[in-house]
Image (tube, helix red, strand yellow):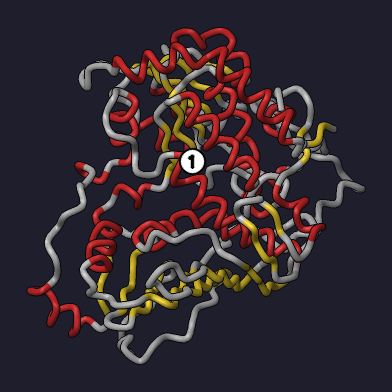
Amino acid sequence: MKTCSFDRRRFLQTATLASAVAAFPAILRSQQGRSPNSRLNVACVGVGGRGRAAVEGTKGENHVAFVDVDDARAARTFSEFPDVPRFRDFRVMLDKLGGTIDAVTVSTPDHMHFPIAMAALERGKHVFVEKPLTHTIWEARRLQQVAAEKKVATQMGIQGHAAEGMRILKEWYQAGVLGEIREIHSWTDRPIWPQGVKGFDHSQRMPVVPATLDWDLWLGVAESRAFDPGYLPFNWRGYWDFGTGALGDMGCHMMDGAFWAFDLSAPTWVEAVSANATTISAPTASVVTYQFPGRGQRPALKWIWYDGNLAPVLPPEFEENRPLPENSTLIIGTKASVIAHANYFTVRIVPETKMQALASSLPPKTIPRVPGGDHFAEWLGACKGGAPAGADFDHSSRLTEMVLLGNVALRARRRIEWDSAAMKITNLPAANAYLTQQYRGGFGL
């Protein structure tokens, strides 16, 4: 097993060397730009399940490669695009076609986001990665660093960041409509897959790997183990070795809008309570509390996350007959409170009578909008020399780091105190092991 090292000197030397080798073409590309009407050569890694969104979102470009380890899951895409070359191994695809590829999308289980994105970045490719950006906090920081060095266009797949609602939220906040924000609550019906799992019993019968699946490639950087259909196609989300649980699945959506609108920094501490957590699997339900520091005239802010169909105590202004969404965020302001759609597609002041009363005095739209709210088009425009995408790796690495700190607290079962500058948990040294992971060899990590 290879272990990720925190030897900073070797880390910086390696990064500098890699940057020197590949920076010149990337710089030329960023300076010259390209016509907005030109078509990019796009390779999609993961084209079944959620990967269909990347295929559809880039269909106006040239698809030059599809990569998927599961022929059955990818069958629909393969049949619709019979002329696009197919691969099971992203490394083989990059080795064979790397010189012709402009951009890469990554829609795989969480544990493979980093190795695939890093391999593409090191070759100077523009990269789109589904949420959460990475499986660990160390990976998020590394991707942000390399993306900045390569000067390429990046995006994390949180469609709400291109939507109207979060811009309205920021405009309201900046105009003083909401007053001070000291408390936020986010809740979700996830997990909708098994969590609190103790493992599989293969003593009576060993499952057979389907002929359509390359199990070893699906495992990728994860530790080798026997196949079990209980991991697929979606249940991997509940296992720490592959997924990031309910918080990793929905947190990057539901915590993005307020994190961005209120310009939050890293939390100073995080603590969590949970039900039925195991060493291998995320809990069946949890409540995670993040404490953000005050800055300047802004007060400290507490953000509480609930999953497993738990929900907060609602404030008096929330109407008794108003239905409570299964996935939503409630922002408590000293002047007005807001309930936001899970992806911030819409935001409304509560109660609705107050929303109507304030409607005529709400501030004008001042923040640029993304046409159609299309986060794929936004990223593709950035690839062609346009403005950086809103959820680029600079933003999404910080958001992902904040979200994943909740999982560190869940696994540590203690309050963790966070030194963001040092990327270190100061009060519980053993918990720092959860900031990174061990990688199986063969993937350049």
Q: In the depicted view, which residue is nearer to us: 127 or 241?
A: 127
- Quadrant location of the N terminus? top right
Mark 1 surroundings within 10 Å by alpha-carbon count, few (fewer than 14), some (14 through 19), many (20 or more): many
Residue 3 in the image: state x and y as whole percent. Answer: 80, 36
Residue 90's place in the image compared with 365, above or below, is above
| Residue at the farthest left position | 360
**Residue placed at 60% from the left, 70% from the top?**
288
| Residue at the farthest right position | 203
Q: In the depicted view, which residue is nearer to us: 21 or 352?
A: 21
Residue 350 in the image: state x and y as whole percent. Answer: 27, 80
Residue 173, by quadrant, is bottom left
**Residue placed at 78% from the left, 51% from the top?**
433
Residue underneath mark 1 = 130
- Quadrant location of the C terminus? top right
Residue 220, by quadrant, is top right
Is 44 situated left or right of 197 in this image? left
Which kind of residue does numbered mark 1 sit on? Answer: Glu
Residue 382 in the image: state x and y as whole percent. Answer: 31, 30
- Helix, strand or loop at label 1? It is strand
Residue 60 in the image: state x and y as whole percent. Answer: 28, 24
Residue 305's place in the image compared with 70, above or below, is below
**Residue placed at 42% from the left, 26% from the top?**
152
Residue 235's place in the image compared with 246, above or below, is above
**Residue placed at 52% from the left, 24% from the top?**
121
Q: How many marks?
A: 1
